[in-house]
Amino acid sequence: MKVRLLFTLLYCCFIALSGAFSQTGETWPRLERSYMNHFYRENDSYSKKCFDDIFPDRQGRLWLVPCGDERLINSIGLFRFDGYSFQPVEVLSPEGTVIEAPLVTGFDDQGRFIGTTEEREFFRMGLDTHESNIILPVDSSFSNFQAICISSGSDEAFALGKSENSPPLLFRLEEDGLVQEPAFHYPQREEMPEMYGMTISPESIWLLNFSLPIYRFDRQKKTLDTYGEQDFTVLRKIEAEDRRTLDGRFMPKLLVSSASNVYLLFKAVYDNQLFGLDREKEKFVPITDQFPADWLSVDIFRDQAGNICFLFQDANAAYRAVLETVDGQRFDYSSVVAGQQDIRSLAGQDFRRQLFLLTGTGLYCAGIREEGLIQQTLTDKWGSSMADLPDGRLLINTVQDGWFVYDKITGKTMPFQGPDCGTERPAFGDGMKQQIIPDKDGKLWFISRSYLVRYDPATNDCESFNFGKRGALFAFAREGLAVYQHSRNQISFMDVRTQQAVAFGDGVQQQFEGFVRDILVDQQGLVWIPTNNGLWKIDIDRGESEVLGLENGFTDSRFTSIFEDAGGRLWLGTYFGGLQVYDPRTGTINIIDQEQGLSNNTVMSIIADDEGDMWVGTEYGINLVSKAGEVLNSFHQEDGLTYEIFERFDPFKSMDGRLYFGTRQGISNC
């Protein structure tokens, strides 16, 4: 599936939760939807099912919680969506039996699911094994424990629970079980509600029910505050006979923003009123006057980045929305949710980039257009390699015009004159430097003809090591040992200190039938050499080499580039076979080409962003590919690229997370 994402520049002013916000509906900048995909297939009955909630995991997969009737009738508590198909997931007990009607509510700190069984037992489930364990209090004196509600956030999870010999108590989830929070004392009430909601923030744990009071446990002071009707400046209560049926969908929603603003939405008993907590007065005040008068509050959602989406319906029952970002800015988000019916849940890593919607007609994915994402510099130069300087500027080498420095704040570029490095020709003169590699001490290494050069940008000092052979590519196999390409099809292992070659035996391949296209030393210390006639794996400790190609499952053995992800998988570019994602541990290969939405099958460069998604330079644009292998977007000159034909130069990720791609018509950064 191929989707396109174009981006719009975000301009806005600062917002604070005191009295009225400075922005109004007339002044909010708009975020526009760039695409909307509906994951509905006529021949896939699972895509037509009713879902209530959605959870994106750390690997980019989506997990969907079926509606209550679906769970009860079919005993299926989860569906997994990998970008292509829906698969039911049975939650298995430790004995291997299926847990009936499980309710998944979130993740623990290790990324495992947590939830409750029909009998209100607390369980934890592995995402890949589907095996679960019933989690009990560490203190065995709590017998017949039942979880009233559970919640997770900020890599932690809590449960409000009770046993036959105790009032409701608060427990923190640890690896070996539930640990009681001794300072929490549930207030005495005539009757305890059957259902509770819970919200966790670093400062507080909030407990709420369909009606007041609301409880806030202060995690620092170890105190419990109660908010009743007297703590709301305006409160419209619906008479019992006029209320909708009270089920989990209509539980009040309380969210805490990254700036510690507290928002509360009542959905049933108190007439869809939206409040914010005035921390000076310790009262909840209505904030509906901060939005258009004919917008009725429907729901509020928080993404994994901390942005909050306020969902409304206007007088014509059309959905409207406002996005409040982590820095307090607000945007009109209505275009993104326009045209939907019966929105049940919103989720995503970052609502400014992408939004998943669960509605009465299925699962949707919306991309957000954001102009200004792609910037350009040196559009009249051929950019080859880049590196960060200590002051935050970018050092750039060009193929024909020497060196430059790019100021990321001002956007200005100026020539750079480096020191004398003791090389025959100036190391900082004209001529292509295909790589600049930083070491752990912040020094920058590059090849200048037959020299390996070490430059210290902090002191502007330089040192060179003459290897006697003109080089192109290199990598460090270990400290002080360089893998050095010195002809199109040869490498040597060079001791930097002695400037002499090091032999590791006849089993270590150093000459290849194909041209060497790249060099990678992986997390295990293995050396990988992609060539246009196979992929070589070299283990210098064992003195062994192996070549991989078509017989191993690759569909193209003419490799162009290589990148190792955080999980140890190798992402390999090929001339005509697209991306080939190889797992050295299992030998599995995942092919991502034009049939899966890649803009071009000639892949020249690969790099990961801070979220672990891959940006893939091809001979026709850049592609954004998720960790799971789904092609999310493609970028071209009309989207802001200086040039859309990418060649053999490595892209670069700077300290601030921005990505830089060199081409013969300048550098694009995004």
Image (tube, rainbow, N blue to C red):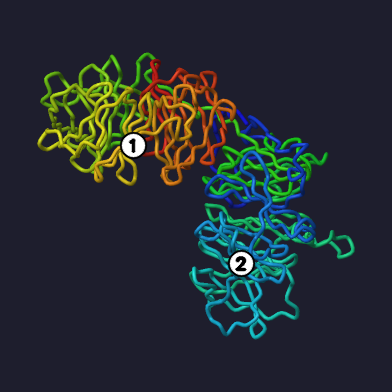
Horizontal and vertical percent for residue 162?
65, 78
Is 32 situated above or below 144? Answer: above
Quadrant including the N terminus: top right
Sequence-wise, the earlier of marks 2 and 1 is: 2
- Mark number for residue 546? 1
- Disc sitting over residue 273 in the figure: none
Q: Which residue is mark 2?
A: 123
Q: Residues within 10 Å of mark 2 (few under 14, many from 20)?
A: many
Residue 585 versus residue 537 in the image, above or below: below
Crowd around label 1: few <14 · some 14–19 · many ≥20 (10 Å): some
Is 658 or 333 nearer to us in this picture?
Answer: 658
Residue located at (59% from left, 48% from top): 56
In this view, the mark in front (2 or 1): 1
Residue 250 visible here:
no
Between 251 and 569, which is closer to the camera in this rendering?
569
* Residue at the image position 40 percent from the left and 22 percent from the top: 667
Q: Amino acid at mark 2?
A: Phe
Q: How many marks?
A: 2
Q: Position of residue 436 (x, y in %)?
A: 28, 30
